Image (tube, helix red, strand yellow):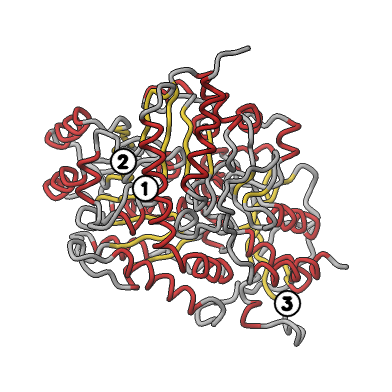
Amino acid sequence: MKPSESQQGVFRSTEDMAPYFPQNIPDSWSLGHPLPPDNPHAISASLPTWNDVYCWSMRKGPVVQAVQTGYPRMRIHKYIEELNCAVLSRLRASAGSRCLTFPSLACANRFLKYLASETNAHTSQSTEFGLAGDLPETIDASKAIWAPFVAVIYSGDEDNHGFHFWRQGGDGITSRHACYALSLFDHLVPTKNTEPSATLDSEVDLPDRRGSAFGENEKRALRSSIATLASSEKGGRIAAEDVLLYPCGMNAIYSVSRALRRMSKDDCDAVAIYGFPYAETVPAISMCGWQTLTLYGHGTAKELQDFEASLAKGHRISGLFCELPTNPQLESPNLSKLRELADRHQFPIVCDETVGTFVNIDVLPFADVVMTSLTKLFSGGSDVMGGSLIINPRSPFREALRGSLLAEWEDIMFPATAITLLRNSEDFVSRVRRCTESAQAIADYLNRHEAIDRVYHPSLNATRPFYDECRRADGGYSNLLSIVFRKHSSAIKFYDHLHVPKGPSFGANFTLALPYAQLAHPFELKWAASYGVPPHLIRISIGLEGKQQLLKAIRSALEICSSPPI
C-alpha cells in the first residue's frame, strides 16, 4: 500500500473519532503511551515516574525513544515529520538540511524572518506545494484545496532556532493538515522554489480557501458557541464576529502581541506581564521584538504599586498580559485595579482565561482581549489543538485592535480541526462543572494533609477575592490545582505511586498529573522557584473520573510517601 493511501485511510477514520472518556476508576499507562490511548492525534504522552519526566526534559535516549507522541508544539508530530521528510526527498535537499512545514505563506515568511534575525543567515528558502491540475474524480476538490502547504528548507545548524519558533509561535502545520497533505502528496507540486536541484512546475499561488464548504459551518458554530459562552450581563453580549480562531492558544498570544506592536508608537515600544504566566507565554510575546518587556511575576500588591508608580512616571506600555487564574499557581490578578490603570494610562489588557473557563469566570468587564486555548477544557478530548481571541466590543481599543489583528489574520484552522473541536465541546459546560466540583473536594482534602506545605487553588489562595470578582454566579474555582510537599522526596514518592494518568497538558477529560517545573522550566529551576514555582510542585488537572475514586488514588499515594522507610 502506498503511504498516501494509508494516510487517506487514517484521515478519514480520525475525522469521525469520538473523544476519549475515562472510566470511573482512574487509569494509568506505561512510559510513552499516547494520552488519550489509541488516537493518532493524542496531544499528551505518559510519563509515569519522576525520573521519566527528568529524562524527557533532558532528552535522554531511552525515554525519548519510548515516548510515542507529545504536546504538538513541543514535539513534532509523526505525521508532520513524515511530511517534512517527504518534502526533503521530493526537493532532493542537500545532506544536513532541515524542513518545517506551514499552513500558509505568511506563516512561513514569519519563520524565515525570525530565522534571519537570529542567525544572520539568509539562505533558507520557502516552497509552496500546490495542487497539480485536474484531480481524479475520487478526490473531493472542495476538501483538496486544504491540502496545499508551504515548506521551509534550512540548515541543520539552525535547528535550535527553528524548533524555538515552532514551539513558541504556534505557526506550524497541524497533524490533521499534515496527514491530509500526505494523503494527496502525489497530487501536490512544488512552486516558487529556488532550490536548483528541484524539478519545478510553473509558479501558481496556493488556492484561495475562502468559500470552501469544508469545515465552514463548524467554524461559524464554534465562533457562535464561544460568543454565547463568553457573554454576560456584566460583560455584555458577544457576537460571533468578535471571535477569531487560531491553530492553537499560543498562536493567538503570538498574534495579539504582533497586533499590539503594530499599534504601538515610537515612544511606547513596551509591554508588561502581570503575574507568573505559563512557561511559553513570555517567549511568544518576546518574539515580536519588543524593546522592553517587564515581568511582574509575583503578582503581589507591592508589584502592582511598582507598576502604578512606573506608569505615573511616564513609562508607557502598549499592552498588559495576564492570566486568570495563573498556571500553575492558580493566583488571580487584581483585574479591577488593572482596569483602572488601563483606563487612566490608555493601554489594553489581554487576559488568558483558559484555566478559569467561560463557565466559571467572566473577565470581559476588565479585559480588552480575551484569549483561550481551546485545546484544554473546551475540547477535553486531548486530541486537537485550537485557540481563540475575543475582541471586547465595549473596549475603547476595539476598532484599533480589530483592524490590527485582521490586517494579518488568516483562516488557517484546518477544517477537520474545527469539526473535532465542535464535536468535543458539545458537553463543555457539564464537563467543567463536574471537574470543578471534584477539584474543589480534592483541594480541600489535600489542604488538610500534614505532608503538604501548600495547595495552590483559586479557592484557597489569598487572591481569592480577585477571582470572586470575576466568578460567575454559578461558577466554581477551576479543575486545576497544584501541591507543594514539605519534602522534595515526598513529592517524588507521591508522583511515582499516584495511580492516575501522568503527562503534559491539562483540561483533558481524564486526570493528568505532572511535576510542572521539571518539564516547563528544567533549565531554570532556581528562577522558577524564585517566583513561587519550586522544583517539587506537582500540578494536577482533575478529570471526569469518579470523585471518590480520585480521592482514593490520592490517599493511597499519600500513605506511601508519608510512611517511614523500612
The numbered disc on residue 458 is 2
Nearer-N-terminus badge (3/1)? 3
Is 238 on the left-hand or right-hand side of 94?
Answer: left
Nearer-N-terminus badge (2/1)? 2
For the point 13% across and 46% down, which residue is it? 340
* Quarter occupied by residue 142: bottom right
The numbered disc on residue 132 is 3
Nearer-N-terminus badge (2/3)? 3
Is 481 on the left-hand or right-hand side of 263?
Answer: right
Residue 191 shows in the view: no
Q: Which corner quadrant holds the N terminus? A: bottom right
Residue 216 shows in the view: yes
The residue tagged with tag 1: helix, strand or loop?
Answer: loop
Amino acid at pointer 3: Ala
User: How many numbered discs, if any?
Assistant: 3
The residue tagged with tag 2: helix, strand or loop?
Answer: loop
Q: CA distance from mark 2 to mark 1?
A: 7 Å
The numbered disc on residue 120 is none
> Where is residue 365 shown, x and y percent of the image?
20, 57
Q: CA distance from mark 3 to mark 1?
A: 49 Å
Q: Nearer the viewer, mark 3 or mark 1?
A: 1
Amino acid at pointer 2: Pro
* Quarter occupied by residue 383: bottom right
Evaluate if marks 2 and 1 touch, with contact meaning CB atoms under 8 Å apart: yes
Q: CA distance from mark 2 to mark 3?
A: 55 Å
* Quarter occupied by residue 7: bottom right
Given residues 293 and 140, the one toward you in this image is: 140
Evaluate if marks 3 and 1 touch, with contact meaning CB atoms under 8 Å apart: no
Q: Residue furthest bottom?
A: 137
Q: Which residue is mark 1?
A: 478
Given residues 478 and 382, the one toward you in this image is: 478
